[in-house]
Image (spheres, rainbow, N blue to C red):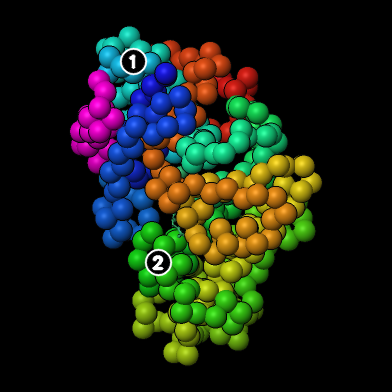
């Protein structure tokens, strides 16, 4: 039995977890900062790193207590090294280095995107994974289609050229006067709307596996702003967000939310299913915060010819159990970092043999 202590602090969630053999969660403690950032409509980096510092010690202790273990039982420490906010990552990495040095434990730096992939190892399976698998990673910072040919073996088939899918949800929520984070509130609002009222753009359709969501956000702004209705040639205003009384009078926010959500889901599903088919994937996975979206799960399942797997909701958002799971597989392959480990805020997902 191998126990990995996972630490996650790349964005606005402070997480610590204990995972056994890369697949069984003994504890998974997350402190969310959502309320701290809500007034800004997005994550305020300096506020985030300070909040991580305040809670990380308690979160780590709670993770050990809830797992019923002590540091003496832990085999290695896995920590998110990137990508993410530099100041936030530093808190987790330095905390993990302190544990590794103080307790003479092996240290494993983990790519946050690889963590999202390994949330799919924590769901319990009836049969072993047959590679290749295609995974859509969709979060506040990323929209990637990744081909996985083995543990730690990745090829990124496509990614966003501008906004991430979750970022689009957050920005559109803000311009509709809805709260942060945008994904859950747009999903709730869309339940009362008709997704066919607005025909929002599906960018880069039929053009490979990259995504683009910034034009979609602008199209939503054009649709809801009174001064822009019917004046498509006017210079575009900045998408700063509108208060509810600034929306065009005849606008139905649920219809806009439903049509926007349908456009995002449509293009995510279309490209992922195509990638999975083209690369002979045996399963299609969805991970990251946006994978909590019910319409995305349903549409992917409906349109995919191969089985679709999604993490439970608690493992969609950032958490340390997924980092511990990814760290376990790296650890078992002999991967180790030393105390010179530094944060990588812009770190792309690379295969284990290419990790520098
Ligand atoms: O993975 P995550 O917790 O953090 C990052 O690594 O970015 O993802 C957060 C993102 C936010 O943009 C949030 O709006 C989005 O996930 N999200 C959703 C839903 N729940 C969270 N987007 C669409 N539908 C949801 N139900
Ligand atoms: Zn994430």
* Residue 60 visible in this rendered orientation of the protein: no
Q: Which residue is mark 1?
A: 100
Estimate how packed mark 2 is, as few (under 14), some (14 to 19) or many (20 or more) residues with alpha carbons within 10 Å: some
Q: Which residues are magenta?
A: 48-70
Q: Quadrant of residue 295?
A: bottom right
Compared with 100, 213 (above or below) is below
Residue 64 at x, y = what percent?
Answer: 26, 28
Compared with 243, 99 (above or below) is above
Q: Residue at x 60, y 36 (%)?
A: 127
Residue 191 at x, y = what percent?
Answer: 47, 74
Marks 1 and 2 sit apart, C-alpha to C-alpha, by 40 Å
* Residue 264 visible in this rendered orientation of the protein: yes
Residue 300 at x, y = what percent?
Answer: 63, 58
The answer to whether residue 59 is magenta is: yes
Name the one closer to the observer, 277 or 340: 277
Q: Which residue is mark 2?
A: 185
């Amino acid at each position: 039995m191998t126990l990995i202590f996972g630490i996650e602090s790349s964005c606005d969630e402070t997480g610590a977890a204990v995972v056994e053999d890369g697949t069984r969660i003994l504890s998974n403690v997350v402190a969310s900062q959502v309320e701290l950032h809500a007034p800004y409509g997005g994550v305020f980096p300096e506020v985030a790193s300070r909040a991580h510092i305040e809670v990380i010690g308690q979160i780590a202790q709670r993770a050990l207590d809830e797992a019923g273990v002590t540091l003496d039982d832990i085999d290695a420490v896995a920590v998110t090294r990137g990508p993410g906010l530099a100041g936030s990552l530093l808190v987790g990495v330095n905390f993990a280095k302190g544990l590794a040095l103080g307790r003479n434990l092996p240290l494993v730096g983990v790519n946050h995107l690889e963590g999202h992939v390994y949330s799919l190892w924590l769901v319990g399976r009836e049969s072993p994974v047959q590679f290749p698998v295609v995974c859509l990673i969709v979060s506040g910072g990323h929209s990637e289609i990744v081909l996985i040919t083995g543990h730690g073996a990745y090829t990124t088939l496509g990614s966003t050229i501008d906004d991430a899918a979750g970022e689009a949800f957050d920005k559109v929520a803000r311009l509709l006067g809805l709260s942060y984070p945008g994904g859950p509130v747009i999903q709730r609002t869309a339940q009362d709307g008709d997704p066919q009222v607005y025909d929002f753009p599906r960018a880069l359709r039929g053009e490979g596996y990259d995504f683009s969501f910034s034009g979609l956000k602008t199209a939503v702004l054009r649709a809801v702003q009174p001064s822009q209705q019917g004046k498509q040639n006017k210079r575009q205003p900045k998408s700063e967000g509108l208060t509810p009384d600034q929306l065009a009078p005849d606008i139905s926010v649920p219809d806009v939310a439903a049509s926007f959500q349908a456009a995002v889901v449509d293009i995510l599903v279309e490209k992922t299913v195509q990638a999975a088919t083209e690369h002979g994937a045996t399963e299609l996975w969805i991970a990251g915060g946006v994978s909590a979206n019910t319409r995305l799960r349903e549409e992917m399942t409906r349109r995919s010819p191969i089985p679709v797997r999604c993490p439970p909701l608690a493992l969609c958002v950032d958490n340390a159990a997924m980092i511990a799971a990814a760290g376990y597989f790296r650890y078992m392959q002999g991967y180790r970092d030393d105390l010179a480990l530094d944060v990588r805020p812009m770190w792309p997902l690379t295969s284990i043999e290419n990790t520098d």
